[in-house]
Image (cartoon, rainbow, N blue to C red):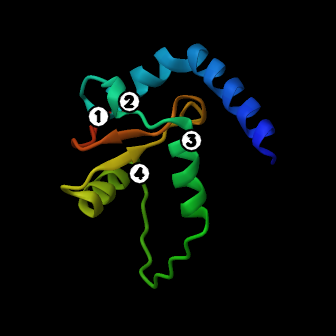
Amino acid sequence: MSVSEYKRALLYRKAQANVCKNDYFNKIQSFTNDTVVGGNFLTLEETDNIINSLKDKKINSKIKVEIDSYQQLVEFIKEKVAGLSSYLLIDEEWKFCGMYKISSEFSSDYN
């Protein structure tokens, strides 16, 4: 993708953010049980850079984890990232609004 195509795509994504922003904020607030802070959003460029760097990483693990419910998934994540800042990406909205940085605990009541 050329630079001009990427910039055009960014403009489109930023415009789409206006459409889904309220829903995304509500999802983040439900997931974190905390007020959404605008300053915690990464720019689309920063988001893209992190996603691209993660695509290049290879992680080999021999640990098998079986997760049967949402609550087990949340507990697994809490255990692994306890005390660390994390990035939250929910549904497709993150592609338009950017990653959201959280340092609080996840809500176990999210539906």
| Extreme residue in the left direction | 83
Amino acid type at image mark 3: Glu
Q: CA distance from mark 1 to mark 4?
A: 18 Å
Query: Up-down: is 80 above or below 45?
Result: below
Amino acid type at image mark 2: Ile
Residue 9, horizontal then vertical, whole percent: 73, 33
How packed mark 3 is, by other alpha carbons closer than 10 Å (few <14, some 14-19, many 20 or more), is few
| Mark number, residue 32 | 1
* Residue situated in front as seen by the camera: 24 or 2: 2
Q: CA distance from mark 2 to mark 3?
A: 20 Å
23 horizontally vs 101: left or right: right
Q: CA distance from mark 2 to mark 1?
A: 6 Å
Closer to the camera: disc 2 or disc 4?
2
Residue 1, horizontal then vertical, whole percent: 81, 48
How packed mark 2 is, by other alpha carbons closer than 10 Å (few <14, some 14-19, many 20 or more), is many
Residue ID at (49%, 35%): 43
